[in-house]
Image: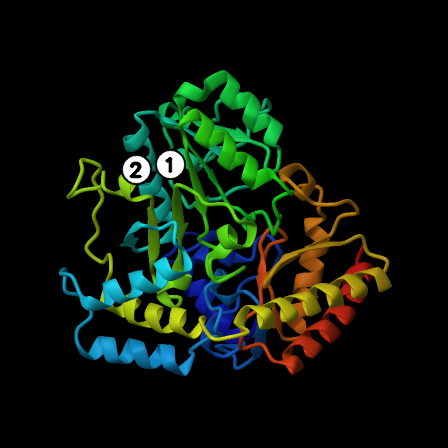
Amino acid sequence: MGERSRQLFEEAARYFPGGVNSPVRAFRAVGGEPFFVARAFGSRITDVDGRTYIDYVASWGPMILGHAHPRVVAAIQKAAEAGTSYGAPTEMETRLARLVQAAFPSLERMRFVSSGTEACMSALRVARGFTGRNGIVKFEGGYHGHVDSLLVKAGSGALTFGVPDSLGVPADLARHTLTLPYNDLEAVRGLFAARASEIAAVIVEPVAGNMGVVPPRPGFLEGLREVTRRHGALLILDEVITGFRVARGGAQELFGVVPDLTCLGKIVGGGLPVGVYGGRAEIMEKVAPLGSIYQAGTLSGNPLAMAPGAETLTLLQAPAVYADLEAKGEQIERGLAEAAAACRLPAQVNRVGSMLTAFFTAGPVHDYATVSRADAGLYGSFFRAMLDRAVSLAPSQFEAAFVSLAHTAQDLEETIAAAREALAVAAASR
């Protein structure tokens, strides 16, 4: 960390817990302290000490066009000139909704909110209100925002109720959350056989992205769709990360699974604070003012997010966008795997489209148990060595790296060359 970043971090610690406003930014999982950002453009991000990095954090995924895309910036400026918030409907909300629905036909009705957490929280309330049941099924390692009822650890048994994973979460609330191993369809079937009448919904990241990238096994998502439909529960796909990322229509397009409800995140707002939840019309029409399931937000649909969102989703309609992202993701995947093999380091590179994670472990990674075997200390050494070589990755073994349309052939070549050197450094530190 540069001197200016160090000074700013020391000052921030006087105001914010751990000196940050979101825990992973503290760099504690990888050692050291965070650099402070001054600006970003395209594929690169520059810190307050003047050092520029090739960025694969991408604001945790939504900067799919790259940072400060000129058309997105212009849309924000134009919107701001007309006022920043009205607390009243605007035409831009409907324009953005048309673009969302064109990519996600399952969102027959939707609501804009201000974050992915808010989207998931609202979707759970709708599921409970619609079904009249309280139970929610989630999966080990799945993160759906800091919603009380979803901050739950995995139990030791597949059919046990969860316990709170954070102070401040009432046990009485957490007991309605049941946690199962990701990619274990038989555990899901067993749980429904025992407790189907209690379960309002299954919520799942269709491609896990918050324990690192873990793809669904063939048939897993299809099985969730079948078992929820058969027992009258709702299937909620949390596509806050995967929506417009792994395909224009998200994981539900990629894997051909139609959920009852979908949650989307900041990519819909061009990286600004936005969330979306929606789904079947008969479900969403239970939401106020048409129904008695209440949800509201002063900044929901605010123009500063709607305008850059519409610009972003329009740009993502261009031909070959996702073929380009796929090719870039594959190049990074191959480069990391070859570099790890050359250094004789155990590594598994999991990738879906333009999101990927290199796990430092010998065996395949397909659920939370296998994720947990990864060598986080080795990742920390790799992370620091990459940062020394001007490449910014997520400061945790258990997060994703994201490729953007702004990454150039030179960026990718420089990244792979840096990875060869960084992995050699990491191997030497073992």
Quadrant into which the C terminus falls: bottom right
- Which quarter of the picture shows residue 378? bottom right
Mark 1: which amino acid?
Answer: Asp
Q: Which residue was labeled with disc 1?
A: 148
Looking at the image, tell me whether mark 2 or mark 1 is earlier in sequence order.
2
- Residue 164 visible in this rendered orientation of the protein: no
Residue 206 % position (x, y): 53, 46
Compared to 124, does 256 lie above or below?
A: below
Residue 99 % position (x, y): 35, 64
- Which quarter of the picture shows residue 381? bottom right
Q: Residues within 10 Å of mark 2 (few under 14, many from 20)?
A: many
Mark 2: which amino acid?
Answer: Val
Q: CA distance from mark 2 to mark 1?
A: 16 Å
Residue projecting furthest to the top: 194
Compared to 390, does 172 lie above or below?
A: above
Q: Which residue was labeled with disc 2?
A: 126
